[in-house]
Image (tube, rainbow, N blue to C red):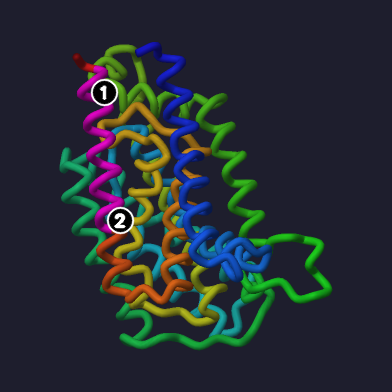
Amino acid sequence: MNPALRRWLNILGPVFGLMLVWTLFALLQPETFPTPRNAELIARQTAIVGIAALGMTLIIIAGGIDLSVGSVVALCSVVVAWLLQRGVDPLLAAMASIAVGALCGTINGLLITKLKVVPFIVTLGMLLVVRGAAKGLGNEQKIDADLTWLNGLLASLPAEKRGMIFPPGVWIMLLLSLGMVGLLRYTRLGRYAFAIGSNELTARLCGVPVVRSKIYIYTLSSAFAGLAGLMQFSRLTVGDPTVAVGLELEVIAAVVIGGGSLSGGEGSVLGTVVGALIITSIRNGCVQKGVANWIQEILTGIIIVIAVTLDRLRHRRTSE
């Protein structure tokens, strides 16, 4: 297949999938699903998955994986609440959340590159370590905090602010998406990520600083997860160490549905955002239709399997 045609199919395929999902639920729930109010709700629900998935896009392009995202989101939501409860300025608490996320990513990157341990094992272990740290910081219970402007990042817009269309958290996700596009297209780190994911040995022989680049990639990705944790706090208004269990699977699925390859070397920001919208739209539609939670989990699992299978088939055809 022509490379240009293949690239466009990877980009437009998820968009058509999103249109199909919206059409289906609009027909099933015409009174509630295709409404501006519900569109805002889906956008707010997408912000957490979408922001974390932007960072995961960079990792998957570089041929890596991060299973600790959900735990990092939970820890960072607890960090924000813990700091606010002690009177720390909201802006400093938000910055601390992102910094804690970045620190987790740096540890992942160092273990992967310095100890030569595969990303799956390192991040699986970090998933448990970070989740335990979140529970320890919160004394195994949620942390309440006084209301601040952070609580409004993903709150539903009041009547006097309807002109914003979406709450600030959604606009932050969209701005970060533009920033990630710029990073992938116009920076060395973006070019290095594609080179490492396509063929790490060749990239190393061509002078790409593989070790340093991987550490930067994992640090930046987890900083995005830290910001997603801040959004999680805003949505729940508490720090809860038990939230975001399984979020890493939705984040990975969003990237793969959007055309990212688990083999590395492929991925797009637009595809990732559309993939996140597909996942949250399906969940939103199922809730409105009264589908049981256990069925929703089965559907999510099926979507992940289908996405990975399509990725395998796509690469099998390319190699033939």
Residue closest to the eye, 248 or 149:
248
Q: Is residue 223 visible?
A: no
Q: Is residue 316 magenta?
A: yes
- Above/below status of 25 relative to 317: below
- The answer to if 53 sits in the magenta stretch is no
First-in-chain label (2 vs 1): 1
Considering the numbered disc 1 on the image, is that residue within a helix, a strand or a loop? helix
> What is the C-alpha distance between the residues marked 2 and 1?
25 Å
Residue 79 drawn above or below residue 99: below
> Residue at the location (49% across, 24% down)?
188
Q: Label 2 amino acid?
A: Leu
Q: Residue at x 36, y 40 (%)?
A: 59
Mark number for residue 249?
2
Q: Residues within 10 Å of mark 2 (few under 14, many from 20)?
A: some
Q: Specify whether 154 is left or right of 123.
A: right
Tag 1 residue: 200
Residue nearer the viewer, 294 or 186: 294
